[in-house]
Image (spheres, helix red, strand yellow):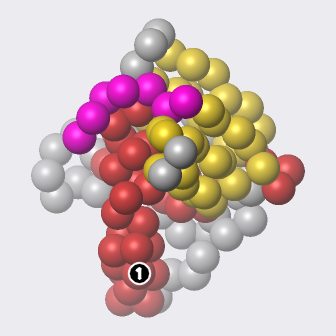
């Protein structure tokens, strides 16, 4: 996965969507909910395989602020005060490219665990 930085990053729809453009033909509109439930933080991913947590109840979460971290990542501050995940450029690209498989898998996990968005 390329670690090249995006050409442009924009918050849209009052913090409900993060638009990430890597080039003229590679732009992703990532919902705040999707970014929040896929946070790379230890709180969500755990400290090793099998420790992942299914995050529920984030349907209406919004992004309050974006903060660059060096030249390699973005810290996203959500309105539920979650701000510990560092979204590297490669991870943001991965989330965009894999959204069509990750999102339905997340929804299925919620259903299996009887949780709601």
In the image, 50: left or right of 69? left
Number of disc labels: 1
Q: Where is residue 98 in the image (x, y as percent from the top left)?
A: 35, 63
What residue sits right under mark 1 in the picture? 104
Give neighbour class at mark 1: few <14, some 14-19, many 20+ (Cα, 10 Å).
few
Q: Where is residue 28 in the image (x, y as percent from the top left)?
A: 54, 54
- At 69% from the left and 54% from the top, the residue drawn is 17
Depth check, front residue: 101 or 9: 9
> Does residue 38 appear in the picture of this structure?
no
Q: Position of residue 101 (x, y in %)?
A: 34, 74
Quadrant in which residue 99 is drawn: bottom left
Q: In this rendering, is residue 95 above or below 55? A: above
Q: Is residue 2 magenta?
A: yes
Farthest-out residue, right: 14
Write the start and end of the magenta stretch as one range.
1-7
Depth check, front residue: 30 or 75: 30
Q: Position of residue 91 (x, y in %)?
A: 36, 41
Q: In which quarter of the image is the N terminus?
A: top left
């Amino acid at each position: 996965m390329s670690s090249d930085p995006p050409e442009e990053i924009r918050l849209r729809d009052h913090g409900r969507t993060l638009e990430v453009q890597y080039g003229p033909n590679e732009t992703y509109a990532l919902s705040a909910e999707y970014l929040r439930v896929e946070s790379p933080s230890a709180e969500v991913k755990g400290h090793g395989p099998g420790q992942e947590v299914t995050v529920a109840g984030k349907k209406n979460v919004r992004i309050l602020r974006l903060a660059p971290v060096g030249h390699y990542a973005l810290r996203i501050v959500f309105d539920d005060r979650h701000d510990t995940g560092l979204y590297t450029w490669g991870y943001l690209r991965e989330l965009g490219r894999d959204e069509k498989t990750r999102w339905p898998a997340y929804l299925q996990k919620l259903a299996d665990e009887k949780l709601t968005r």
